[in-house]
Amino acid sequence: MSSANPRAEVRDVASKARLRLWLKLLKTSGSIEAELRRRLRDRHNTTLPRFDVMSALSRNPEGLKMSQLSQFLRVSNGNVTGIVDRLTDDGLALRVAVPGDRRAQVARLTPAGEAEFARLAAEHEAWIDEMMAGLGADDITEMSALLDQIQPIGANQTSKDDLT
Amino acid sequence: MSSANPRAEVRDVASKARLRLWLKLLKTSGSIEAELRRRLRDRHNTTLPRFDVMSALSRNPEGLKMSQLSQFLRVSNGNVTGIVDRLTDDGLALRVAVPGDRRAQVARLTPAGEAEFARLAAEHEAWIDEMMAGLGADDITEMSALLDQIQPIGANQTSKDDLT
C-alpha cells in the first residue's frame, strides 16, 4: 500500500528505524543496569535500590523525607521506608526531626553511611567507566547531544493531552 | 592528589564524563518508558508488561512456554502466568498442549489477540516516532553505532570474574 505514496514510505522507514533505535537503547540501558545489580549483589552484598537511596541522601546532606526519596527514585513509599529502616539498623542512616514540625522526620546518612557510599560510588563509577570504555571523549559528547534531541514529552503533546 | 599525575587526571575526567552519559542514558530511557506506560494506561487501558507479553507471543506464533516468556521479559513466572490468564479470559490468548508432551503447554495469541496487538503496536511505533522526531536518519545511524560500542559485560571481564 505505501508504495503508492513515496512520502508515506519514507516516513514509514524512518519510523521503523526510530523503533529499532529505541529497542537498542532499552536493551543497552537494561543490560548495564542488570550488570550493576549483579555486581552490587555479588561483590558488595547490596542492592541497586539501596545504592540509589544512599546516593540521594548523599546529595542531600540536609536530609530527605520519605516522600521526597520516593519521588527521586520512583519507587513506593513502603519500599523506601524499608530500605531506610535497614540502613538505620546498620548504622548508615538516621532519622532526625524537622525543626518546627514535630511530626515530620527526614533521613540522613551517618558519617559511616557517607564513607560506605563513597566506597560504593567509586566502584560504581569504575564499572561504568569499564563498560563504556569503547566510547572516547568525542563519542561521549556526540551521544550526549543526540540524547538531548529526544523529547519523551513534547510541550505541544502535553498541552494537547491536558485538553482532551 | 590527581594533579600530581596528569594521566590519572585525564582518566578521572573521562570516567566522570562516562558516568554523566550513563545517568543521561538512564534518564532518557526511563522517561520514554514512563511515557509509554502512561499512554498505554490512559489511552488503551492496558499495561507495558501486558503489551510486552503480547509482543513476544506475536513474534512466536508457534507459542511460548511460561518459562520462555519470563526469560524474554525478565519478569517472574508468576506475573507472566497472571498476564496470560487475563489475556485468555479476554479471548486474546489461549493455551495449547505441546504435541508429544502431555504436561507441557504453550501460550499463543488468538486471531483477536493478533488484531489487538497489531493495533497497539502501530500506536506504540507512532509514539516512539514522535518522541524521537528530533533524530534524523544520520542521527539514528550514529547513535546506533555508538550504542554498539558499549559493552556491559566485556569478554575479558567475564572470564576474569569467573576465576576470582
Image: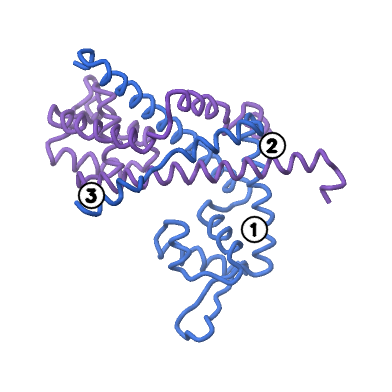
Chain colours: A blue, B purple
Front disc: 1 or 2:
1
**Amino acid on which disc 2 is placed:** Thr
Tell me the subunit letter for badge 2: B
Q: Which mark is residue A117?
A: 1
Front disc: 3 or 2:
3
Q: Which corner quadrant holds the N terminus of chain A? A: top left
Tell me the subunit letter for badge 1: A
| Residue bearing mark 2 | B164
**On the rendered structure, is A132 left or right of B13?**
left
| Label 3 in the same subunit as label 2 | yes
Location of residue B33 with respect to B98 vertically, above or below: below
Mark 2 surroundings within 10 Å by alpha-carbon count, few (fewer than 14), some (14 through 19), many (20 or more): few
Front disc: 3 or 1:
3
**On the rendered structure, is A116 left or right of B129?**
right
Disc 1 on helix, strand or loop?
A: helix
Tell me the subunit letter for badge 3: B
| Residue bearing mark 3 | B42
